[in-house]
Amino acid sequence: MCRVERVQIDGVGSPEDLAARLAGDGYLADDGLATAAFLALRMGRPLFLEGEAGVGKTALATALAHVAGAPLIRLQCYEGLDASQALYDWDFPRQLLHLRATEALRGPVPATGDEVAAIEQGLYARRFLVARPLLQALETSPSVLLVDEIDRADDEFEAFLLEVLSDFTITVPELGTVSATTAPLVVLTSNRTREVHDALKRRCLYHWLEHPGFDREVAIIRRRLPHASERLATDVAHAAAVLRSQDLLKAPGVAESIDWTEALLALGARELDPDRAARTLGAVLKYREDTERVRAVGLEALVR
Amino acid sequence: MTTAARPRPGADITATVVGFARTLRAAGVGAGPDRVHAMVSALAELDAGSRHDTYWAGRLTLCSGPDDLPRYDRAFEAWFGGHDVGRLRPRTAVRLPRQVAAPAPGQGATGGPDEASGLATSSDAEVLRHRDVARLTGAERDELHRMLGLLNAPAPTRLSRRMTPNGSGAIDPRRTVRAMLERGGEPARLRRRRRCPRPRRLVLLVDVSGSMAPYADALLRFAHAAASRRPGTEVFTLGTRLTRITRELSAASPDAALAAVSGAVADWSGGTRLGADLKEFLDLYGQRAAARGAVVMIASDGWERGDVAPLGVQMARLARLAHRVVWANPHKARPGYQPLVAGMAAALPYVDDFVAGHSFAAFEELAALLSGPGRRGA
């Protein structure tokens, strides 16, 4: 791995520098997360982020890509994901079309052995190869590769990912080996719907993301929605904190707080009141049981 | 937060880190040599003299799950906070309640086979199959363990998104076109595909409280047999707290696995908080995925300390998430058993199959039930 260069961000010499740069892009990272991202950059190790849905795992990858000035290449995992969707695929229709075109141009002249070999060779040219995210990330230097929700993919896929992430090369039998000149900065996220295998985690920097504290949440909401008043952002952060303490099936994350604030803004609210809270509760609570529970306790409890 | 007791200036960072990792392993975090190496490299990028940087360098490289974090914090405090490291030695191993209920010879079931003799013949094995595991002698118990190891539990399946070649499914365009290409574009035989079956996840929740003590050992062996045959099986113990023992049970030999479990579970033969345990299971694992579409087996007698209303609520939640809920209650086999225990009565409406789980024959029945496709009850 020493041969491969790493993604560089100019002028970042400490986690604090990186946190400041991320903040400039609208992502407020705490000490731990900034250190994790800093080490991922410096050590060239993938960053494995785990935590509740909506705590900003995917957003970090986006922000890192912005700060590094590199394109973000995203691989959304799902069950049954296989190599042809993650790595590369041969474009069969185009290959077929190419053959037919060659045939039409030549007319009914029999081809010599050399010509047949040349045509076959031409079928496996780079232009007939469809690059899927992993190959794209190796071919794009520098780049940030986001492997989103790795826990959703089958466990066989992890072993395969391990192979690609260990030396950042992919071998296409018909074409040869593709290696990255600059190793992509890799961010893996997991909602922990299943335990990801230790072999993969071992090669990564592991960070568990918590819900942000009150002040940080207010700052995040204000940063994301500059139109929201200080009062509204504080009210929503307070209400979100109350909701998180209420033992719900799905406690709201920062993403929900931002959605909620946006919904309230759309209604022209400058602060949170029980009536508007009732009408916009769907933006923050996603289970009927949770909505009923919060209504039973009373929406006044959410308002300061 | 810029001073640290260790590493002192000039102190060898690697030695400090290795010592810390040893403490961490004793606290139950599996920090292997490559992780230790990663921590040293991380410290090289940060300020090794700063307690804050040291904390994060270790946490990011040595931990691998949220369960590890509190242990890490404790170990870090103990090692770098200047406290006595010896306090973090592993708990003295808790013994499994293996012999708790084995009665003295002659005191057990009258009219049964000779308690003191070993077991070799098949007719003895046949008798053993139906004996209550709580009333076995040591030799009988060993034989039962051997039988449990042989228990076969094929997996119930569901259809996955993934397609496999099949003679009679929908047409597979890719393979058909590829076959045509091989023949120079001539129409070839149509290739077909269909969605392939995947095993359903099995989740076992085993009650290890005092009232279940005579059965806990056999049930955990049953869990080990199930987990070793079906990858992806999750196993938890219920008691005064919920403990995930999937990793401990992954050892190949049942005895090694149970020894690991005995170290991991802190509440052997204690009380029961079924409702709270179940809630914790659903919050932390079940709702996210472990219970979704899975076959969930709870092995418990339903003794609940305190209010049983939360148990009913959590069982309703579990029933909505799981494909099937099986409840094994060893006491069910007793003549004239009625589900009078309040917890059992509260849980029953949400249970698809209510079975015994007291003898090898009952375990066989249970294994068949867990692997069957069975429709969900009303």
Image: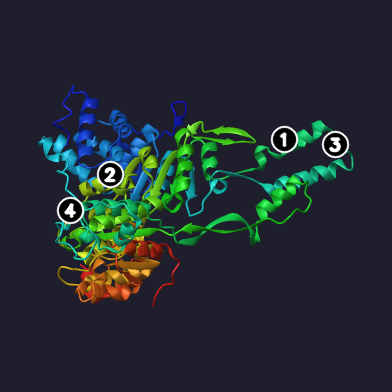
Mark 1 and 2 residues: CB-CB less than 8 Å, in contact? Answer: no
* Residue at the (17%, 53%) spot, across then down: B99
Residue B99: image tag: 4
Residue marked by disc 3: A111
Question: In front here: B116 or B205?
Answer: B116
- Residue B239 on image: x %, y %: 20, 60
Element marked by disc 2: helix
Let me know if residue A61 appears in the view: yes
Q: CA distance from mark 4 to mark 2?
A: 17 Å
Of circles 4 and 1, which is in front?
4
Element marked by disc 4: loop
Of circles 4 and 2, which is in front?
4
Vertical side of B265 occupied by A284: above or below = below
- Residue B77 on image: x %, y %: 15, 40
Of circles 3 and 4, which is in front?
4
Q: CA distance from mark 1 to mark 2?
A: 57 Å
Q: Amino acid at mark 4?
A: Gln
Q: Amino acid at mark 2?
A: Ala
Residue B247: image tag: none
- Are both tags, 4 and 1, on one chain? no
Mark 4 and 2 residues: CB-CB less than 8 Å, in contact? Answer: no
Q: Amino acid at mark 1?
A: Gln
Let me know if residue A245 appears in the view: no
Residue marked by disc 1: A121
Residue marked by disc 2: B256
